[in-house]
Every structure is written in C-alpha cells, then in structure tokens.
Amino acid sequence: MVTMQSENHRTQHIGWLRAAVLGANDGIVSTASLILGVAAASATQGPVLVAGVAGLVAGAMSMAAGEYVSVSSQSDTEHADIARETIELATDGVHELAELTAIYIQRGLDPNLARQVATQLTAHDALAAHTRDELGISDTVSAKPLQAALVSALSFIVGAGLPLLTAWLAPFSALKPVVAATSLLFLVILGGLAAYTGGAGIVKGILRVTFWGALAMGITAGVGMLFGVSV
C-alpha cells in the first residue's frame, strides 16, 4: 500500500503574501518618503505629522481599492475562461480530450500514456483537469479580490504606522536621520520576513526591498530640499 507523505510547499502563501509585502513596503516607503520630503521643507514637526497621517489614511484606502479592482479584473478573466471551457467541454469533448492529451505529451509523457492520463482525468473531473492544466488556474493561486484588498490595506497601515510613530517620538532636530535609518531597518526586516515566508533567499529579498525603498526616500527628500519652502 502506497502512503502519501505530506509536504510543506510555499505556493499556498502566494496570494496573501504578495498583497502583504506590497502593502507593507508601500506603507513604509511612501510614508517615510512623505515625512522626509515635508520635513526637508518644513520648520516645525506639526506639518510633518499631519502629512504622515494623511498619507497613511489615503494610502490604505488607495491600496485596498487598487488591489480589489486589479484582482477582481483577474478573477473576472479567470471565470470567463472557465465558463468558455465549460461550453467547449459540453460541445466538443473529443477535441478537448485531444487538447489535454497534447498538453501531457508536451510535458514529457509518451502519446499512449498521455492519452490514458487525459482520459482518466476527464472521466474524473474534466473541467478541473482543463482548468488546472490548460488554463493554469488552481485554488492555490486563483484570484481572491477581497483577501487581497484587506491584506493590502492592513499591511499598509502597519507599514505606514512605523515611520509615522518614529516621526512622532523623535525630536524634530533629528527627525530626518532617525526616520530614514529606522525605515531602512523596517525594510530590512520586511524583506527578510517575506523571503523566509516564501522560501526564497533572505539576503536577496532584503537587498531588493531595501534598495528600492532607500532610492524612493532619497529622491523624495531631495525634492523637499530642492523646494525648501515652509509647508
């Protein structure tokens, strides 16, 4: 008797992990950049905090709406393809069986075995077989608009709250270097956690997130210094 050993794969994390990393990264970078830009052009701490809070609220709403619309569009496309495949299976099953067989041949099975596999999977659940192997849609990676919107908004709030809290606690004279340094630290932690959760290289994940975050914050601070006006 053959027993199946349970394996722990990371693909089940793809949907929420992508949204969480995007939201937290955008929250840290955009809010820290906004704080640094306003601080570079302001003489007091008040406008910096107001701008940070406004950026947090606006960013969280924007992330939620943007993710929901984007992932909903993907979900609509997936459902349309599945509906089309359902019709094709009902009206031209012979062609669909040949199509599934050809897919398995391309993946390395010999023609006879590919035909047997396609026939058995079609008899078991034809739509599931075509959805998975022809369309590339599965429960693991299918679009979940509400999940993406909620995760993005919440992670943005957490990410944005970190530099905002730092700006509130730090003395104004040291606000810019403190916010910049702590935000880079937050990005390092985010990159490491995201890479670890996804099973990727931690160093690579850290460098990727931190580099682009530092670049964004530097450019925004530079713009604020360039204008150099009170806000």
Image (spheres, rainbow, N blue to C red):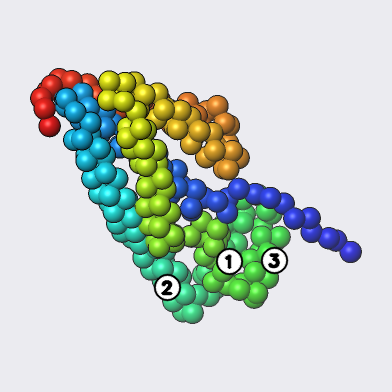
Q: Which residue is the site of mark 3?
A: 116
Q: Which residue is the site of mark 1?
A: 129
Q: Say which amino acid is labelled 3.
A: Gln
Neighbour tally class for label 3: few under 14, some 14-19, many 20 plus, Cα within 10 Å: few
Q: How far apart are the alpha carbons under marks 2 and 1?
A: 14 Å
Q: Say which amino acid is labelled 2.
A: Ala
Q: Is residue 139 visible?
A: yes
Classify mark 1: helix, strand or loop. helix
Front in this rendered view, residue 137 or 42: 42
Q: Residue 108's x, y, as percent?
A: 65, 49
Label total for image: 3
Mark 2 or mark 1, earlier in chain: 2
Q: How far apart are the alpha carbons under marks 2 and 3?
A: 25 Å
Q: Residue 155's x, y, as percent?
A: 42, 48
112 to 36, vertically: above or below:
below
Q: Quadrant of the N terminus?
A: bottom right
